[in-house]
Image (cartoon, grey):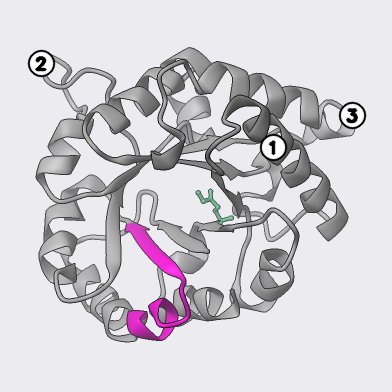
Amino acid sequence: MLIAGNWKMNGDPSSMDEFGRMIARAPEATARGVDLIVCPPAILIAKFVDRATVSKIGIGGQDCHAEPKGAHTGDISAEMLAACGATAVIVGHSERRTDHGETDEMVGKKALAAQRAGLTAIVCVGETEAERDAGEAEAVVGRQLAGSLPEGLDPARLVVAYEPVWAIGTGRTPSLDDIAAMHAFIRATLTARFPETPVQILYGGSVKPSNAAEILAVENVDGALVGGASLKADDYLGIALAA
Ligand code: 13P
């Protein structure tokens, strides 16, 4: 199981206290075989890495540029994240696909860049509500998987996160049957693509301590990508301990 926390655009140096509480409680989760990765905003990555050296919490980025360096104002490369001590990076989050027009092709290049730098690539996919209502959820996710996972990716350093867009930050989640059906579809797609190596599949979207146990018990759910509830140590660890 992997419980990854995506802090999104939240946090500043005063967040070190809350992160300290996560570090203090992390061994409760890791002792049960649950891996923890926290992805703070980029300005805090190096600080979190320094603080996390005594704990088992991995630190990740929320995005990376496809190129290793150069004239790309405001962007951060996978190599820069790795040099600061990050071990993973989220790519293709629906908020980046929407806010920054990221296409499957761009996401695929970022995933390759992440692995080139030695990071685990956490690739996000998920349908909108209109797409689900139209019965197109699997077709959309299938297309995203095909387009966002280019040739040359190493399945051993790949995680796929299924995040239905309509469940993000809304308090709404798919039924457990719908989560099971989509995760089975993603599993079948990934197994056909990478027959030798199982790829971890996370569910994301309104995961909280009160629904984590039932969601994490669904077949083919290997963990969670948590947004809002990853900002507080009690909620984040509550989810990790439900795994
Ligand atoms: P919430 O947990 O806040 O719904 O966000 C999910 C998410 O987008 C994680 O990447």
The disc placed on residue 70 is 2
Residue at (21, 60) in percent of width and height: 12
Quarter of the image where one finds residue 122: top left
Percent position (x, y) of residue 217? 72, 68
Position of residue 1 relative to residue 41, above or below, is below
Residue type at mark 2 is Gly
Quarter of the image where one finds residue 223: bottom right
The disc placed on residue 186 is 1
Asked whether mark 2 and ligand 1 are closer than 8 Å, the reply comes as no
In magenta, the rendered stretch is 26-38
In the image, 137 versus 146, the foreground residue is 146
Q: N-terminal of the two: label 3 or label 2? A: 2
Residue at (74, 71) in percent of width and height: 214
Asked whether mark 3 and ligand 1 are closer than 8 Å, the reply comes as no
Front of the two marks 1 and 2: 1
Position of residue 83 relative to residue 176, above or below, is above
Label 3 to label 2: alpha-carbon separation: 43 Å
Which secondary structure, mark 2? loop
Q: Inspect the magenta stretch and tell me whether residue 155 lies in it.
A: no
Residue at (39, 65) in percent of width and height: 36
Q: Inspect the magenta stretch and tell me whether residue 27 lies in it.
A: yes
In the image, 110 versus 1, the foreground residue is 1
Percent position (x, y) of residue 22? 32, 78
Front of the two marks 3 and 1: 1
Residue matched to label 3: 135
Position of residue 24 relative to residue 161, above or below, is below
Residue type at mark 3 is Gly
